Amino acid sequence: MFRKRPRSGCDPRTRRKQTIQTATAALLIMALFSSLTMFFIGWRKRLGTERKELLRIWEDGAFEKAFTLSREELQTKPMDYFLLIFYGFAAYQLAVAQIASADTQFYIDECIWSLRKALLCKEGGGDLRIQYVLGKAYYYKGAGYADLAVRFLEAAQNGAYQARDLPEYLGLSYAAKRDYRNSVAAFSLALASERDGGPAQDPAGFAPEFIQQDEYPSDLLLLSIARSYMALDEQDSAKAYLMRCVETSKDAETVVAARLLLGNIFEKTGYISLAEAQYLALLEEDGENAEAHYHLGELYAAGGDSTRARAEWRKAVRIDPAHRSARSRLNM
C-alpha cells in the first residue's frame, strides 16, 4: 500500500505567516525595482532637459551663462563628455571676446583644460571639433605653443573637419613657428576656400551646433600671405599680394599696413621713387602716420637731402613721441 505523504510540521497559522512574508518581500522588491526604474527614467529625462537648456542658452549667445552652468554641472559630473566640451567651447568664445590679455588667457587655459580632459573620454578620441578648437586655443596661448596649435589643427584638417577659418589659423600657427612655406600654402588654401564660398557642410558628420567660426576677411589673408613671402625673401610674390590688398581692401588700416610693407620692399630693393609714392599715398589716405614719415626721412637722407629728412623725422616724433628710430636719427 502506498503510504500517505507526511504533512509539514508547520501548522496552518505558520504557513499563512510565511506566505504573507513572501508576498510582502516580493512587493517590496517590485516597489524597489519600480522606484529605481522611475529614478533612472527621471534622471535621463532631467539630463536631456539640462542639455537642451544649455544648447538654447548657447544659441542665444549667452556664453557667460553657458560657461557658469556647465562649470556647476561638472562639479557633480566631472567626466561628463558633453559638459566638458560645452565648458571648453564656452570658455573659448569668452576668451576671444576679452579685451585684457590676462582675462583672455584665463579663459583659454580653462578651454584647454576642459578639452584635453574631454579627449580622455571614450567619445573624445574621434571628435574633430575638439581638435579644431584646441588648435585655435593654443594659437592664442602665444608663439611658444605654436607647435601644439599646428598639431591639433592638422589633426582636424586631416580628419576632414571643415571650418572656414581652419586654414587661416593653420597659416598663422605655421608663421608663428617660422614655417613660412607651409604658412603660405595654408593661407592660399584659405583664400581659395573663401573665394569658393567655404565648406557647405561638415563631412565628418559632427553637428556644428556650438562651433562658431571666426571671420577672417580676404584682404587680411592677402596681407598674411605677403608677410610670409617676405619672410621667405620672395619679394616679387609678396609685392603681388600687397598690390592686390591695396586694390581690393575696403579697410583703411589694412591698406595702411599693405602700403607700409610695399614701401619697405621698394626701399630695400632700390626702387626709391616707388617707395616714396607708397608712403605719400599712405599719408594722403591716413593723414598722420609716424612710420611713413620716418621712412620718408630715410629716403631723403639716402638722397642727400638732410633738411627734408630731419623734417620728416620730427613729424614722426610729434605723432609718436616714443618712436625710437626717429628720435635716434634726430640725435645724430
Image: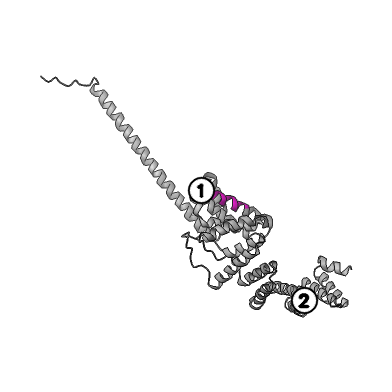
Q: Earlier in the sequence, mark 1 or mark 2?
A: 1
| Secondary structure found at label 1 | loop
Badge 1 density bin: few <14, some 14–19, many ≥20, Cα 10 Å: few
Tell me the residue that label 2 is attached to.
Answer: 270
User: How many residues crowd mark 2 within 10 Å: few (<14), some (14–19), many (20+)?
Assistant: few
Give the residue furthest to the right.
332
Residue 286 found in image quarter: bottom right
Residue that badge 1 annotates: 121
Nearer the camera: disc 1 or disc 2: 2
The amino acid type, in three-letter code, at marker 1 is: Cys
Which segment is the magenta one? Answer: 109-122
What whole-number distance in Å separates the C-alpha atoms at marks 1 and 2? 59 Å
How was the colour assigned to the protein in this rendering? one colour
> Is 39 positioned to the left or the right of 213 in the image?
left
Q: Is residue 31 above or below residue 318?
A: above
Residue 244 visible, this angle: yes
